[in-house]
Image (cartoon, grey):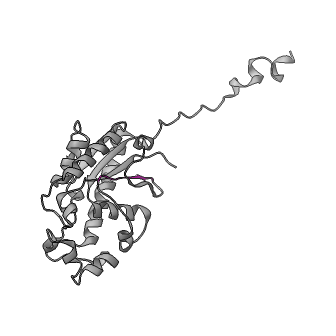
Amino acid sequence: MVSVATLLLLRHGRTTANADGGLAGRQPVELDETGRAQATAVGERLRPVPLAAVVTSPLVRCRQTLELALPEATPVVEDGLIECGYGSWEGQPLKKLAKEPLWPVVQQHPSAAVFPGGEAMAAMAARAVASVRAWDARVTAEHGAEAVWLACTHGDVIKAIVADALGVHLDLFQRIVADPASVTAIRYTPLRPFLVRLNDTGGDLAALVPPPRKRRRRAPRATDSDAAVGGGAGTTAR
């Protein structure tokens, strides 16, 4: 596999909305106690990983996650990583939303879903994928092919990015899981993306750091052969 930068997609920790069964959307919900513990724990797992860049959704739950997980980092806000705009659905209980006529469309045909007063899921997927691919190219250009960088964002955003990496239609993205504080790793090679980790909540993240590239061995020249240094046929027939 061609040596390329590695993207780590980190979902924010659990929020009060996650705990209550509500759809937060772009509302300023914060991490709950469990979410804060999750953020601290994933920070310990990320400690051995040298991150060339850290970017984040502008929403507070992502910024709180990074403050706890990577307190020494200076994240760059990337608007393309913001949660899908759920419009009038935001702040409502999922049990109530499940009775809406749009709900089966969101679950079975999300590429056609447009939230009332909000964003189309296809538009969310397009801008999220464009954002991470642009950042990946930038990190690779500035820090080299062995660089590792991290983007902290949201569940549906991560699922859409993973669907693109796998080359599957957005209508299949509901089959993908991205738990709170999970890590997903992708490498964008010139040929195709590779999904290296998915929804990892306890693995060794240091193993994702690519080893330094080996120097190519110099091809031997004619003067380096046995025939020119004594012991070869060219030096014994004198």
In this rendering, is residue 57 above or below 52? below
Residue 141 in which image quadrant:
top left
In this rendering, is residue 111 above or below 199? below
Disc tally is 0
The image shows residue 4 at horizontal and vertical percentages of 43, 46
User: Does residue 56 appear in this view?
Assistant: yes
Question: What residue appears at the point 37 percent right and 36 percent down from the top-left corner?
Answer: 48
Residue ranking furthest to the right: 237
The image shows residue 200 at horizontal and vertical percentages of 39, 52
In this rendering, is residue 154 above or below 168? above
Locate the C terminus by quadrant: top right
User: Does residue 77 appear in this view?
Assistant: no
Q: Is residue 186 left or right of residue 25?
A: right
In this rendering, is residue 175 above or below 237? below
The image shows residue 74 at horizontal and vertical percentages of 21, 40
Residue 55 lies within the magenta run:
no
Q: Is residue 5 left or right of residue 225?
A: left
Taking depth in this image into account, of 71 and 166 the one nearest to the observer is 71
Residue ranking furthest to the top: 238
Residue ranking furthest to the bottom: 101
The image shows residue 35 at horizontal and vertical percentages of 23, 51
Residue 46 in which image quadrant:
top left
Q: Main secondary structure of the magenta part?
A: strand
Q: Which residues are magenta?
A: 181-189
Residue 69 in which image quadrant:
top left
Taking depth in this image into account, of 108 and 51 the one nearest to the observer is 108
Residue 184 lies within the magenta run:
yes
Question: What residue appears at the point 22 percent right and 48 percent down from the top-left corner?
Answer: 36
Taking depth in this image into account, of 238 and 145 the one nearest to the observer is 145
